[in-house]
Image (tube, helix red, strand yellow):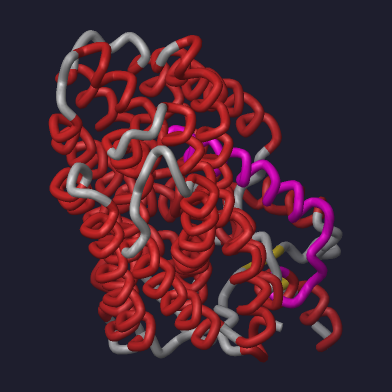
């Protein structure tokens, strides 16, 4: 056989096509559909925080009674994130994401009919499992449909939909809670994901890198690659290499502690833990803290909406900064901004009769920095790990971060009624630990990679 015939029959490597090819309309459609799932994840993630002031009045319970509910819900999220990542690497990112969206949609809808705190806690735990499982698979799908030069931007644009979902939730809650009550908020938060499940089942494709490792699905891979404008001329596709030169033969948590990843795994875990702790002290407890300070339901919901609005803009700005300056400089600057802005909030008197505009502005700025760090952390995790272990790596890292959310349940309960100084001072401290953890990571995305 001639050399040209051998070359013609050799399978086409998908790695260079995906990592260095164009970022076309089909890839952006995947980003859009995945982003819709993340928006609803962000909405349902924060729905209980919005509803607490109304539930407290209806059921005659205290704000502190919700700490165990948040904790077990976040435990469900932590388990869902870790197991969802492994499910994504074994059964497919698409399959795992669709199952996760269906689970948190159904359980959120059922939460609208919870008769007491016990049932609400059970249903929020089930919701948490779905909410947690959605994120590593959404992140991985976006990363694996994006060329290397746009990966950080694409992942961040997807993850920024978490605060965008919270922003939508805050605006909806401000109008729904006073007139329709908290159960209507849960009904809306459940029906929308159920509808989206059907859309994803019809239109969302599987990751090409996942399909390339399963010869029985070669036909499906051919169709996906053709939609992106790539053809193999009858030779088939393969994926034998990694863009960064690191290949992992077997998917397991232990691989995350190989010499190539050990330090970055530990540092990423620290950054996720403290940043998510900070974020969920706000997501879960800010409306209750503002309500306890004398603000009405609309202002309390709008305060969290302002935090989330800042988070959307901060995450987009953070993604741009990573493209321009690399992730190390950009993320350290955002973490430092979070520490400073929360310090300023700790010194701001909370008075329902005065200073609402200033408070909203400061919450907006703090949200920009904190959510800017959190959303770009997912892009950084996708950068640290190679494709063969990426969903497991991102899932395990985010799962450790969810432990920070569990801790936030009790930190928030401890400071929710003590005023703004202790509340925002605690967040400034945890963001300081985030800053230190980010500084220890070695495999940051450099400017040359992100540009």
Determine the residue positioned at 57% across, 23% down.
192
Determine the residue positioned at 41% across, 28% down.
296
Place of residue 412 in the rendered image (x, y in percent of width and height, measured from the top left): 21, 48
Instruction: Tell me, yes or no, whether the highlighted magenta stretch contains residue 26.
Output: yes
Relative height, residue 300 to residue 354 (above, below): above
Instruction: Tell me, yes or no, whether the highlighted magenta stretch contains residue 362.
Output: no
Helix, strand or loop: magenta stretch: helix
Q: What range is drawn magenta here?
A: 18-44
Is residue 137 in sight in this rendering?
no
Left or right placement of residue 201 versus residue 345 in this view: right
Place of residue 135 in the rendered image (x, y in percent of width and height, measured from the top left): 45, 50
Determine the residue positioned at 47% across, 64% down.
378
Relative height, residue 350 to residue 257 (above, below): above
| Front in this rendered view, residue 144 or 274 | 274
- The image quadrant where one finds the N terminus is bottom right
| Front in this rendered view, residue 286 or 209 | 286
- The image quadrant where one finds the C terminus is bottom right
| Front in this rendered view, residue 113 or 198 | 113
Place of residue 18 in the rendered image (x, y in percent of width and height, measured from the top left): 70, 69
């Amino acid at each position: 056989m001639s050399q040209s015939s051998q070359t013609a029959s050799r399978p086409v490597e998908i790695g260079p096509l995906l990592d260095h090819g164009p970022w076309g309309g089909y890839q952006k459609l995947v980003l859009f559909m995945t982003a819709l799932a993340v928006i609803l994840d962000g909405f349902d993630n924060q729905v209980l925080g919005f509803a607490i002031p109304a539930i407290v009045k209806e059921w005659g319970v205290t704000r502190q009674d919700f700490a165990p509910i948040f904790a077990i819900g976040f435990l469900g999220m932590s388990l869902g994130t870790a197991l969802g990542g492994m499910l994504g690497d074994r059964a497919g990112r698409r399959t795992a994401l669709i199952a996760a969206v269906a689970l948190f949609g159904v359980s959120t809808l059922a939460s609208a009919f919870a008769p007491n705190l016990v049932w609400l806690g059970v249903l929020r735990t089930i919701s948490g499992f779905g909410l947690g499982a959605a994120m590593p698979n959404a992140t991985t799908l976006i990363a694996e449909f994006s060329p290397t030069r746009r990966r950080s931007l694409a992942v961040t644009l997807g993850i920024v939909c978490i605060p965008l979902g919270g922003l939508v939730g805050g605006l909806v809650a401000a109008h729904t809670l006073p007139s329709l009550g908290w159960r209507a908020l849960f009904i809306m938060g459940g029906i929308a994901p159920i509808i989206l499940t059907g859309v994803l089942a019809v239109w969302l494709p599987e990751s090409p890198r996942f399909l390339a490792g399963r010869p029985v699905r070669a036909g499906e891979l051919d169709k996906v690659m053709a939609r992106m404008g790539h053809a193999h001329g009858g030779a088939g596709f393969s994926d034998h290499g990694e863009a960064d030169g690191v290949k992992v033969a077997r998917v397991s948590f232990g691989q995350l502690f190989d010499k190539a990843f050990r330090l970055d795994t530990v540092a990423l875990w620290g950054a996720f833990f403290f940043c998510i702790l900070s974020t969920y002290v706000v997501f879960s407890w800010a409306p209750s803290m503002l309500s306890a300070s004398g603000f009405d339901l609309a202002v309390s919901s709008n305060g969290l909406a302002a935090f989330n609005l800042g988070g959307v803009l901060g995450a987009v700005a953070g993604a741009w900064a990573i493209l321009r300056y690399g992730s190390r400089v950009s993320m350290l600057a955002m973490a430092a901004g979070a520490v400073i802005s929360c310090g300023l909030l700790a010194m701001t008197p909370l008075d329902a009769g005065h200073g609402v505009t200033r408070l909203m502005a400061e919450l907006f700025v703090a949200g920009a920095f904190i959510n800017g760090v959190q959303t770009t952390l997912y892009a950084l995790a996708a950068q640290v790990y190679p494709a063969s272990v990426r969903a497991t790596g991102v899932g395990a890292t985010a799962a450790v971060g969810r432990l920070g959310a569990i801790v936030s349940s009790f930190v928030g309960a401890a400071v929710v009624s003590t005023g703004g100084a202790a509340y925002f001072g605690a967040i400034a401290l945890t963001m300081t630990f985030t800053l230190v953890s980010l500084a220890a990571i070695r495999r940051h995305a450099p400017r040359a990679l992100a540009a």
